Amino acid sequence: MKKMIFVLLAIGLNAQQQPLPYSHKTHLALGLKCSSCHKNADPGEAMGLPGENFCMSCHQSVKTDSPHIQKLAAAAREKQPIPWDRVYKLPNFVYFSHRVHTKAGATCESCHGPVRERDVITKEVAHTMLACMACHTERKAKNECTTCHEEK
Ligand code: HEC
Ligand code: HEC
Ligand code: HEC
Ligand code: HEC
Ligand code: HEC
């Protein structure tokens, strides 16, 4: 009984966090790559989130009886993007580019943790100013205030 309440609570919390119970663990186990869904379009700052049409390339036929997939299908049909709750988000006064970092060899995992083992993404790696600056010191990258606090 206790266990069941815990499970219900956990499902409740997950449902609250994201509009759909999308799992990275499930989807990466299918052999998809990060770049299948996160494109890093020019000029390269954002990784971006996948469009619902891409999801529907499978879900046209996979799990169509699920109410979640029906919600996804409706979003694709009505061109209403799923309002994902953003997990990692810097304040507007900080400049950050994914492309600069991936080109410098930083892995997704170093800044976002073991995503492929996660059902739910949480902010498990801190993106504080101190954390950014510590890696810059270690990697001998620029560390002036204006490196991160100026529009480029
Ligand atoms: C099938 C598509 C798909 C694949 C493949 C995928 N993702 Fe995602 N990713 C999503 C969706 C949808 C979200 C938004 C929902 C969420 O946060 O779970 C997301 C969210 C994220 C977020 C949180 C972004 C934020 O700030 O809200 C990170 C970080 C992330 N993905 C990293 C990765 C990494 C690293 C990989 C490869 C190991 C990967 N993803 C592979 C679809 C995908
Ligand atoms: C050096 C650290 C770092 C690395 C490496 C990194 N990220 Fe991020 N990621 C961030 C930060 C910081 C944000 C928040 C950016 C913002 O709000 O401007 C973010 C945001 C995101 C988002 C949300 C959408 C967006 O573009 O803001 C996704 C998805 C994501 N990262 C996926 C990835 C994937 C996939 C990789 C590997 C290819 C990766 N990240 C590598 C630090 C990193
Ligand atoms: C490569 C094919 C493929 C792609 C692309 C894909 N999925 Fe899936 N998805 C699956 C499979 C397979 C399952 C597991 C079905 C099962 O549990 O039997 C699944 C399960 C799910 C579930 C759980 C459904 C439930 O009720 O159990 C959700 C939610 C989901 N996917 C959302 C998404 C979203 C959102 C995207 C796009 C970002 C996406 N999927 C892209 C194949 C895919
Ligand atoms: C994993 C280590 C690492 C982390 C964590 C990291 N950086 Fe970096 N960053 C680098 C490296 C290495 C470079 C230098 C890349 C080059 O010069 O090609 C760099 C370059 C930059 C640049 C471009 C500087 C220039 O040359 O103009 C900015 C801006 C930046 N980082 C912001 C951030 C912010 C903001 C964070 C925290 C959210 C962060 N970085 C976290 C390693 C990191
Ligand atoms: C490598 C990137 C980087 C560098 C270099 C950097 N910052 Fe930041 N700064 C950040 C990030 C990321 C945040 C937002 C996250 C946080 O508050 O920790 C931030 C937040 C701030 C804030 C807001 C703090 C708050 O509590 O809201 C101030 C003020 C600030 N920085 C000033 C500076 C000054 C002054 C310097 C130079 C001595 C500097 N920063 C250098 C990345 C950087």
Image (cartoon, helix red, strand yellow):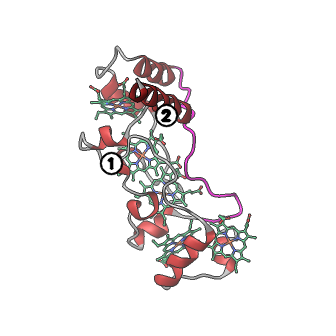
Residue 85, above or below 1: below
Whether residue 63 is in magenta: the answer is no
Q: Residue at x 47, y 24 (%)?
A: 76
Residue 23 x %, y %: 38, 37
**Most foreground residue, 77 or 114:** 114
Quadrant assignment for the N terminus:
top left
Disc number for residue 14: 2
Q: Is mark 2 within 8 Å of ligand 1?
A: no
Q: Which residues are magenta?
A: 78-95
Q: Residue at x 57, y 82 (%)?
A: 142
Residue at mark 2 to residue at mark 1: CA–CA distance: 16 Å
Magenta stretch, main secondary structure, is loop
**Most foreground residue, 128 or 140:** 128
Whether residue 84 is in magenta: the answer is yes
Indicate the secondary structure of the residue bearing disc 1: helix
For residue 95, which quarter of the picture? bottom right
* Crowd band around label 1 with a 10 angstrom C-alpha radius: few (<14), some (14–19), many (20+): some
Residue 11 x %, y %: 46, 29
Q: Residue at x 33, y 21 (%)?
A: 60
Q: Which residue is mark 1?
A: 117
